[in-house]
Amino acid sequence: MENTSKQSIVANNVILQSEDLYKYILETSVYPRELEPLKELRNATANHPTAFFGTAPNAGQLIAMILKILNAKKTIEVGVFTGYSLLLSALTIPNDGKITAIDVNRLAYEIGLPFIKKAGVEHKIDFIESQALPVLDKLLEDPEEEGSFDFAFVDADKGNYWNYHERLIKLVKIGGVIIFDNTLWGGFVALPEDVVPVYKREWRQSTILFNKKISEDPRIEISHASIGDGITICRRVC
Ligand SMILES: C[S@@+](CC[C@H](N)C(=O)[O-])C[C@H]1O[C@@H](n2cnc3c(N)ncnc32)[C@H](O)[C@@H]1O
Ligand SMILES: O=c1cc(-c2ccc(O)cc2)oc2c(O)c(O)ccc12
């Protein structure tokens, strides 16, 4: 793939502008440490028509580290697909931890489910087949759920990211973390609209708006990291 200073490149669902360097990172630092159940689930997803939906393994490694630093026990996952990031969280949180995992597509989840079961972590997962917004709204109706989550990972419909943020900021505790995936949207956020494939334009625009709003939100500290397809790490401060 050609590399120019103006043109961002997305290869293997990552923003990094060198496939060789990405391969180097994976082979040196990620794959040797990737847990066997995650490898198995990733391989089982590899031939899926939307295999690129799966969270980049190096971003996953960072997410696992953040979960550990937080001692996260109670988490939310918005957008499961076959469950790479879900299994990663389930393997990372303690045995009595709980993940509320929401996706409109149970069929995709069922591709990953045998690997989740084999890893012995299914008991930590409450999978809810639904649009995510009503589930988050329902959680917020219960005062005990407010401020009770340690962590949330959002990797679903990009046009709803701000709506998810407005709910998750109330559900995670002060000091808790929300991570949003795809916040560089293949590098298209920094390119003029006319070079963006038409089908990517709507979510490019929502991502640009989301990035601006999140950068101005005083309730959180943020780090916009160029790992995977871009992740924004938000820590609730008030
Ligand atoms: C990029 S995939 C998630 C990938 C996942 N994090 C992984 O590591 O494999 C996005 C998922 O969001 C789900 N999704 C899209 N819109 C949704 C919505 N409104 N509510 C819940 N899930 C949604 C899709 O069905 C899809 O499985
Ligand atoms: O190109 C995509 C598209 C999605 C996507 C499509 C439809 C949905 O309902 C949700 C998400 O997600 C992606 C993604 O998470 C990624 O890392 C790269 C590309 C895409």
Image: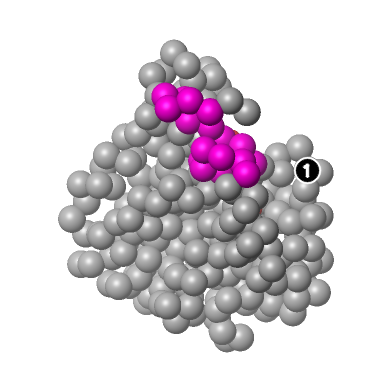
x, y percentage for residue 86? 61, 63
Q: Is residue 138 visible in this depiction of the protein? A: no
Who is closer to the viewer here, 128 or 229? Answer: 229
Who is closer to the viewer here, 85 or 75? Answer: 85
Magenta span includes 10: yes
Who is closer to the viewer here, 215 or 156? Answer: 215
**Outermost residue toward the top in this view:** 194
Magenta span includes 212: no
x, y percentage for residue 25? 59, 56
**Residue 120 falls in which quadrant of the image?**
bottom right
The magenta region covers 3-20
Rendered position, 213 above or below 176: above
Please identify the quadrant where the N terminus is shown: top right
x, y percentage for residue 14? 56, 43
Q: Is residue 50 left or right of residue 225?
A: right
Q: Is residue 26 left or right of residue 5?
A: right
Report the predominant secondary structure element of the magenta stretch: loop
Say what amino acid the circle numbered 1 marks: His
Q: Is residue 212 visible in this depiction of the protein? A: yes
Who is closer to the viewer here, 119 or 149? Answer: 119
Write the residue at 41% across / 73% down.
150
Please, what secondary structure does the residue beneath circle 1 have?
loop
x, y percentage for residue 231? 44, 51
Provide the residue designation for mark 1. 48
Write the residue at 68% across / 63% down.
31
